[in-house]
Amino acid sequence: MSTKLKVLYTLIFLSVLIMIAIIVGMLASYNNKDLSNITPPPLPSPVISMTTPTLPPQQSIESLVNRVNNKKPLDTSDDTIRKSLITKANQNGLVIHTNDYNINYSKDANVFQIELLTQDITPAITKAISWFRDLGMSNQGMCNLPLIIYRDPKAFNPNLKAGMEFYSLPFTCQ
Amino acid sequence: MAALNSPPASKFSLLRSRVISGIRHPFGRHNIGNPYRNNDSNNSRSKTTSLFLSREESEQRRFQTERAISDLQNFFRENIPTKRDLQNSKAFSLWLSSNGLLPQFKKLWHEKIIFEKTYHTSSSRLLSNYSSDDSRNIFSRFAPRYFQLRSKYIQKTVESLANVDMLLPLLRQQLNAVNPSNNSISTKTPSSSFSLDPASLRSTLMSIATATDQMRPNPGASSPTLEKHQETASLGNDSKKAEVVMHQEAVKKVDEQESDKKNDADKTDNHKKDLQIQDLITPAPSANNTSGSLTHSINPKPSMGFEKQSFTFIVPPQPSLKEETKETLPTKKYWSRVSKKFSEFPFLRRTAAPNPLRQQVDAVRWIKYANTSLNNLPDAQLAQHDPNFPRYRAAYKQQEAFLKQRGLSRWRSPSMSSNPSISQQREISLPPETLPFAKEATTGSAISVNLQDRITNPTIIPTTEPLHMQAKRDAATLYRQAGEVPNELSSSVRQALVARNLSQLKQPFSSLQGQLPNITFAQIHQGEIEIARLQAKIQSQRPVTKLSTLITPTPPLSSGPQDPIRLTVTPTSITPSPVQDGSRIDNTNITKKTNVPTTITQPGFNATFNLNIPSRQIPESASFNITHQTKPSTIKFSFKSGIPASSRRSLRREEEGEDYSYLPERDNPSFTDNYSTPNDEQDTLNSTTTATEEDQSDPQKKNRGLLDTRSFISKYRLAIGVSGGAVMIFLLVFVLGLNGVDAGPSTDNGSGTNGGGSTYNQQNVVLQKTVDNTTGNSIKSGSKLTYTITVNVENDPVQEIDVTDPITFSIKGAPTQVTAPYSYEASSKTLSWKLTNPPQPGGSTTLSFTVSPTDNNTSIYNIAYANVIGSQSGTGSLVGSTIPSNTSNCNNRWNITSGYHDGVNFGDPACVLAKSALVQNYPGAQNYPTWENNPAWPKSPEQALVDLVNQDDPANADYWLGISACESQYDPNTVASNGPVGLFQMGHPGVTVTNGQYDNGYVQWQQQVANAVIYEKNLKTLGAAWKYWACARDVFGLW
């Protein structure tokens, strides 16, 4: 290989190196650009699906206490159902458990309770009342049991240390 | 072949001859002990047996033996009752008694039990290992001993049963019925009404005997081990392998069969349990009904040279009996209780239950049982077994008629616990005529315990909870107040308290023994002594917290030296701060041990020391020192407790260092020494309470009455200690009842005894209530008591004063001679006056009424409230305080600004709680580890709060303090982020959803306590007790 060719190849090699250096420098300068001005595409807005819980008016505890203290006798069929439910209750008084409610028999107070286990109060009450009706219990029988409907908000809000919500039956008691 | 057929017949005849002749060793005594020993009496049979011995036969006989063992075990497990079953089986004991066999059976059974223990102890290891892989070697090693023990066991069993004379004729009859020709046993109907099914017993025992005899080595064969070794030595390897394989197959077969039997036994376990008694004493089987027997067939297999025995136990199909007696037959649980209760009685002897209720239940059950299981025996025959049967029959018929009349399907018996609690009553189907009482029965009342009386004439017992629960709580309270932990006598205390409550039910003590079998008079008496001891200790330890008196120096100190008057009360703290005009000191609390002097720097004052008693009990003694420093000089006086607060005080001032006593005992010599007449005006401080002039002029007369009262109390207590405290019981229960009932909001309640009075102070209005008890003694039923309430308006004019006086004791009719106009609410026995023209400042008006109590010898507490409207000192919307909410943080005691507070001191605007002393190491905290161990909670509530919860709800005082510590750390101004407020974090009207008027914590702390107590009572009524508060669960596990 002649000297001229060696010089030519050397120049070509240097030129390639220079080109590479220039390209690398350009890329580096591009990467160092301030990206703060780049506005990212807007994130999709979260779709918040909130079901407004149905909150029937609470019943004052005094009226419930009055009903318990002035309990009316049950008719024969309702009394039979009541006794069967008492028999069905386990040691803790639990008669039936569903995802929406518990039905308890309080031996000390001699009352039946619907303990609501969901935020959707009205549907849960409806289901629990239907359960009693399916057994053949009349509305007045539920009034005279008496049937206490309550919800413990502490079960849904761990920050709460106190509170009880009592609800009335979805029909009028005599 | 004839020889092959003959052994079974010969064995039958052998066993039969032994049994019939009543021999005690059916297998020969000599052979039992040593199987290697030759016995001449059995030579023929042994030789016959030895003809069939071979390796195969050896294995087969081993298998046969195991079958026999298994069958024997199953037989005894299924047919022979355990000792417990026998103890619990009245039918069996009746059967034995009817035949005069009870003593004999007891003796034999005792021997059997003793032998069983020995047998099982020595053979259990062998039996457990026999089914393992090494069973052959182990069996060979232990076989002689095993056979020995097992033979003895069978022997003893045969003795125990065969020697019962009753069995012998039956066995003889059954054995005679054996037909050897077809090698099957047919069960014949026995003539006796009771049959032990001897065929089953005989056949099983015979099979065991056969198997045992066959396994017993013949004279030339020595032990199975030796036999095995000899045979093994004589055979080649192939024969040895064949033997091993055969043995393994046999063992495997045995294991499989045992496993199958075990599974079957498990499946029918419950059924068999029910049938244990029926299996033992079966009704006489009919000719076409042979079920319930153990059939045993013997099929000789000459080719094999051994007998193949098959056992089939047919469970008697008695579903109808089981179903019918499901509800009426005594359960095992019931019998377990009965047997435990009657364990002190002789073996198998069960006397009639002393409890009439249980007797009646027994009657129903046993008549049912007799009708179903005893084949409807006539009364006369039943009466031979149990003289009570006719009575049972009559009771049963009465029950049937009762149920039929009321349309009830069946009688649901109460639990066996005779405690007349409401929980028990609820389990009973109340007949319709008791429905009018359903209200009381379901809201915390109990009904009398007598069964018939409850039906026909129910007695309502006004209790708020089951008697035993109430007694348990009261007993715990007693021990806690006494500073003790419950000891072994606490159960006696509880029983005594139950008896006390029952005594209030107009039930004589003589009737308690039958109704409360768990309670004995000895225990009641012991409990009463313990109660008296605890009460004495409580009396001695009870801290005197408050006592009301009003002291006015006479002559007024303003006429004395003009030097600044310095009054020091020690030990004391002044709560709240003295009014700065120097005219009075309110609410002096002397419970503090700290020496906080209070100085009055202006002359002329009335010192009012209110020492209320939170538990509404009159303290026995209280003392405090007041240092009146003028020159300086010291006035020191003390007084005894039990003295009406409004009674006249006569004190003599002394020079420094000289002590004066007030109202010493009459027999105390110091009484005459130290007592000074009021003539010494210079040295006397006279009370300015509503004591009459007569009283002031003759203090000894008043004192005499008081001393009479004290004397009576002393005698009263003495009577309690000696007689068991019947009267004290009533007093205690009454006081507890008062404390439990009077949970209304109140502070600074005046209190007093008979003839006493009380003072109720608000900032501007002072109520003084006295009772004119002319006798000066305890209250008698029907006596007339005239109360006078003096309403004093101090400084500021007021527009209206509502005075309320709830009468806390039973009175006859309505109050009379009441100052008009007034209103009276009969249900709550509350008198009310509305003073629309109240007296002017400095003036007073009096209200009076007369009542006639219906109770003897009880303490009556003076309580009156005033609601002041229009006072410049504040509008009284709350009982106990007329200070409205303000912005005072009570010297930085309460945080009312940061966090979620709104800058308002709503909980303690008068700073009463803030300035109350802290109770160091509150004793209740020690009862609850979670409270004690949680450093985040303060352990020292304020004394005022302790007093109030003890007053409003003494039974749950510890709970309230614990909940307050957990919820708010005793801060009445606490406001949580989510809205709840106050000591107990209750509702905040307008901010949170509140449930009723009592779900309100945005009130003053006294009202907070009252609201919480009332709210909790309502929750309890609804079956949600304590569920409002998470801390009630976290700290105390109340729900």
Image (cartoon, coloured by chain):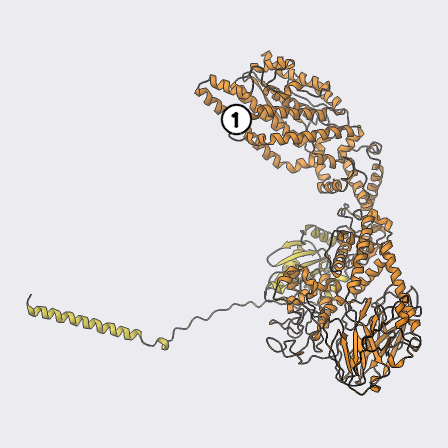
Q: Which chain is yellow?
A: A
Q: In the displayed structure, does residue B464 sit left or right of residue B182? A: right
Residue B408: x and y in percent read: 78, 47
Q: Residue furthest toward the top?
A: B2
B236 relative position to B582: left or right: left
Residue name at image x 62 percent, y 28 percent: B71
Place of residue B290 in the rendered image (x, y in percent of width and height, measured from the top left) = 69, 27
Occupied quadrant, residue A37? bottom left
Classify the position of the C terminus of chain A by image quarter: bottom right
Q: Look at the image and give the colour of chain B.
A: orange
Q: Residue B125 in the image: x percent, y percent?
A: 58, 32
* Residue neighbourhood size for the residue with mark 1, other residues' Cα within 10 Å, grouped as few (<14), some (14–19), many (≥20): few
Q: Residue at x 60, y 34 (%)?
A: B264
User: Residue B58 at what x, y percent from top left?
Assistant: 54, 20
What amino acid type is highlighted by mark number 1? Asn
Residue nearest the viewer, comparing B612 with B828: B612
Taking B256 as reference, is B37 above or below it? above
**Residue B362, can we see it?**
yes
User: Residue at position x 31%, y 75% from top?
Assistant: A32
Which residue is labeled 1 in the image?
A: B137
